[in-house]
Amino acid sequence: MYRLQVTHNDLKPDNIMKTKDGEYKIVDFGLSTVVSSDYPKGTPLYMAPEYIKKYDGYDPILKFKDYTKIDVWSLGVLLYDLTHMVHPYNPSSVEWLRNNCRNDTLIVKTSNLGYISFVSDKLSIEEHMKKIDMLNNIIDGCLAYDPKTRITLSQLKDKLNSIL
């Protein structure tokens, strides 16, 4: 997606599928857009706050400098969901989420993974905990409320590769 300058706009668990070979693939590119598009699309629970504001017409002249940060936010929500088994914020409704984004009052939980099991059992405790700290930092970097401070897709790729 990154090389083609396309954003998915609807990254969520339903749009990730496992192949027969055990690989995971992103599917359903029906809401994807060329990076220069200004029209918000997607599932609000996985939308970046700045995109929700645009979606609601709260700031009709809002322009994005880096649309890929929208997908980075969604990936952060997915990673948080998968590793913590809860959403990084607890919306009582989509309207609650929209109001909190509109008012910049959305509180996103910090990633606080303790001891989780990695695929390899050949890691020392120190190496294992270092990888967990790196994963916490990746998730928090993806979920930075301000898109200017959110990590980029290339940073995300590099950080994930350093864990594997």
Image: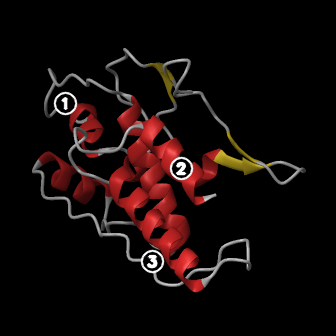
Label 1 environment density (alpha carbons within 10 Å; few <14, some 14–19, many ≥20): few
Picture layout, residue 53 above or below residue 122: above
Q: Are marks 3 and 1 in contact (CB under 8 Å)?
A: no
Q: CA distance from mark 1 to mark 2?
A: 23 Å
Q: Which mark is residue 12?
A: 2
Residue located farthest toward the left when viewing the structure as drawn: 103
> Disc 3 or disc 2, which is closer to the eye?
3
Q: Earlier in the sequence, mark 1 or mark 2?
A: 2
Amino acid type at mark 3: Leu
* Image marks 3 and 2: residues in contact by CB distance under 8 Å: no
Image position, residue 144 (x, y; %)? 27, 52
Give 111 or 27, whichever is nearer the viewer.
111
**For the residue marked with disc 2, what is the amino acid?**
Lys
- The residue beneath circle 1 is 57
Identified at 39% across, 53% down, the residue is: 45
Dot label at residue 113: 3
- Quarter of the image where the N terminus is located: top right
Spatial CA distance of label 3 from label 1 is: 36 Å
Q: CA distance from mark 3 to mark 2?
A: 21 Å
- How many other residues sit within 10 Å of disc 2, few (<14), some (14-19) or many (≥20)? some
Q: Secondary structure at mark 1?
A: loop
Three-letter code, disc 1: Gly
Instruction: Name the residue at 37% across, 16% down.
Output: 37
